[in-house]
Image (spheres, helix red, strand yellow):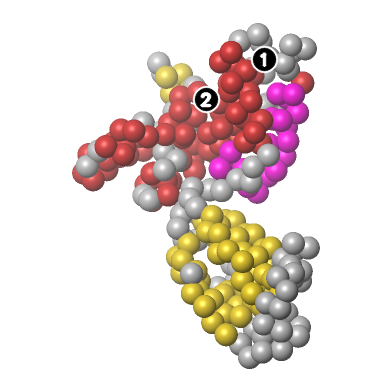
Amino acid sequence: LAAQLQNLGASDKDRLLAWLQANQSTDGGFSQGGSADPMTSAVILRGLRESASLNSVAAAIASKAAAHLLARRGAAGIWSDDVASTALIFEAVHPYTGSDPSVASAVSSYLLGQQLPDGSWAGDAFVTAVALRALALSAQPALDPSLAGLSVKFVDARNGAALPGVSLIALTSSAVHGLSDGEGRVEQRGLAAGSYQLQASLSGYATLSFTVTLKAGQVLDAGVLQMLFGYLAHAIEH
């Protein structure tokens, strides 16, 4: 599906998305042979990942499909009590789990509990491969493909030392607000794509103003920014 969408012209892509939207059930799922099928929903959801960053219709279809799949988890937070199904469906829904870290932890616990003494899952190379992929993904922060993220590090311009406690805000939106950690880093996800005028401040240092442009489905690394001790405010752009 992802390859098809990439190779289609705009009008054909619109028709395909319209077909998917028309065939999506009211609860967000997709059917196979007339019956609701989580794997079909997962395959479509995964195939829409790139398009969901660029197209509002694709984003809406994907969001509904993810909500459907997340609602179909069992009591243990997995799908079908099956390693391959759980791993593959988790890969599809992972970008939409940022607000609920328990999804990743439940999948990780289940998969680790199903690993055999020889290190495999079900003694099968394919099942083992998808289980390992899902485990690696469970440790990664989620990013909704229709949204964006920002990462930036602040250091003292005099010696390059990390600066904890730097306050970062957006001047034109309340979406960005955070304090740098012990490594001087601020990371935020779930931000709308677009341009932001940001301001960083720390007592004793010059206020730093800078502009970033965020793209859906991507985390912008704004790099390492130097804070000037005791100087006037200065501005930069990214």
Gap in angstroms between the C-alphas marked 2 and 1: 21 Å
Q: Nearer the viewer, mark 2 or mark 1?
A: 1
Is residue 135 positioned above or below 173 on the image?
above
Question: Where are the magenta residues, as a range?
Answer: 94-112
Of 131 and 171, nearer the camera is 131
Q: Which mark is residue 188?
A: none
Any part of residue 22 in sight: no
Residue 4, how many percent across, how many down?
A: 30, 33
Q: Amino acid at mark 1?
A: Trp
Q: Residues within 10 Å of mark 2 (few under 14, many from 20)?
A: many
Q: Is residue 110 magenta?
A: yes
Residue 102 pos. (x, y %):
72, 39
The answer to whether any part of residue 99 appears in the image is yes
- Answer with mark 2 or mark 1, whichever residue precedes in sequence: 2
Residue 30: in magenta span: no
Would residue 166 appear left or right of 68 to someone viewing this image?
right
Front position in the image: 212 or 223: 223
Residue wearing tag 2: 38
Q: Which residue lies under the disc numbered 1?
A: 121
